[in-house]
């Protein structure tokens, strides 16, 4: 039954893959958490780094990034092959249109959900998020995302 699941009526249906994208601190993870069902798969690089470091998701050491990327890429391969039996929520920044489209093709989905938040809202949410300790770093990350997004 790889690539298929049972729906709420007991019918066999294909799994859905959603790409939730947008700026840092826009609410991507929150959206995925609010819309996922028990048993769904969440793929979020920040949460992968958190799980392998036991640090806050925004405070993980960059030395762990290659390992986290390898784990994420392996999960992407499972999704691509539909070697899964659950819906998947891919949470990513993806400011570049070509990169978004490439990932959507790879994961065989047209379900891209843009979390449309302004620069000011993202900054405000990051500053109010107690788990984001280095506020200056967060501001730079958000500024960089918007610069990349508007330059495409």
Image (cartoon, rainbow, N blue to C red):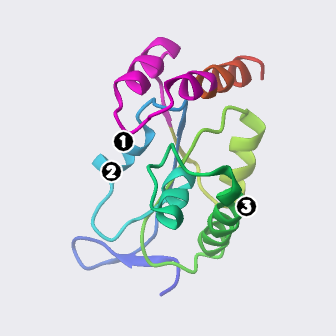
- Would you name the residue on which mark 2 appears? 33
Q: Is residue 2 left or right of residue 27?
A: right
The residue positioned 47% from the left and 18% from the top of the image is 123
Residue 7 place in picture, x, y as percent: 30, 72
Residues under labels 3 and 1: Cα distance? 26 Å
Question: Which residue appears farthest toward the left when viewing the image?
Answer: 9
Task: Tell which circle, 2 or 3, labels the residue nearer the N-terminal end.
Answer: 2
Residues under labels 2 and 3: Cα distance? 25 Å
Disc 1 element: helix
The residue positioned 52% from the left and 62% from the top of the image is 53
Q: Quadrant of the C terminus?
A: top right
As rendered, which of 14 and 75 lies closer to the eye?
Answer: 75
Q: Pointer 2 and pointer 1: residues touching (CB < 8 Å)?
A: yes
As rendered, which of 148 and 100 lies closer to the eye?
Answer: 148
Task: Tell which circle, 3 or 1, labels the residue nearer the N-terminal end.
Answer: 1
Q: Is residue 128 magenta?
A: yes
The residue positioned 68% from the left and 56% from the top of the image is 65
Residue 134 place in picture, x, y as percent: 51, 31
Q: Pointer 2 and pointer 3: residues touching (CB < 8 Å)?
A: no
**Disc number lying in front (2 or 3):** 3
Q: Pointer 3 and pointer 1: residues touching (CB < 8 Å)?
A: no
- Would you name the residue on which mark 3 appears? 66
As rendered, which of 102 and 142 lies closer to the eye?
Answer: 142
Query: 10 Å neighbourhood of mark 1: few (<14), some, or many (≥20)?
Result: some
Q: Quadrant of residue 77?
A: bottom right
- Would you name the residue on which mark 1 appears? 31
Taking 9 as reference, is 152 above or below it? above
Q: Is residue 129 left or right of residue 65?
A: left
Residue 25 place in picture, x, y as percent: 46, 31
The residue stretch that appears in magenta: 114-140
Disc 3 element: helix
């Amino acid at each position: 039954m790889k690539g298929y699941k049972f729906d709420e009526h007991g019918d066999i249906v294909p799994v859905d893959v959603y790409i939730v994208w947008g700026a840092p601190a826009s609410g991507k993870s929150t959206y995925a958490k609010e819309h996922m069902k028990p048993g769904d798969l969440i793929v979020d690089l920040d949460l992968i780094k958190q799980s392998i470091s036991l640090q806050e998701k925004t405070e993980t050491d960059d030395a762990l990034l290659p390992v986290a990327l390898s784990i994420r890429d392996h999960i992407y391969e499972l999704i691509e092959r539909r070697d899964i039996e659950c819906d998947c929520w891919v949470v990513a920044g993806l400011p570049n249109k070509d990169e978004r489209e490439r990932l959507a093709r790879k994961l065989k989905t047209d379900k891209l959900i843009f979390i449309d938040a302004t620069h000011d809202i993202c900054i405000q949410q990051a500053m109010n998020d107690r788990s984001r300790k280095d506020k200056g770093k967060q501001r730079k990350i958000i500024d960089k995302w918007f610069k990349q997004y508007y330059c495409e």
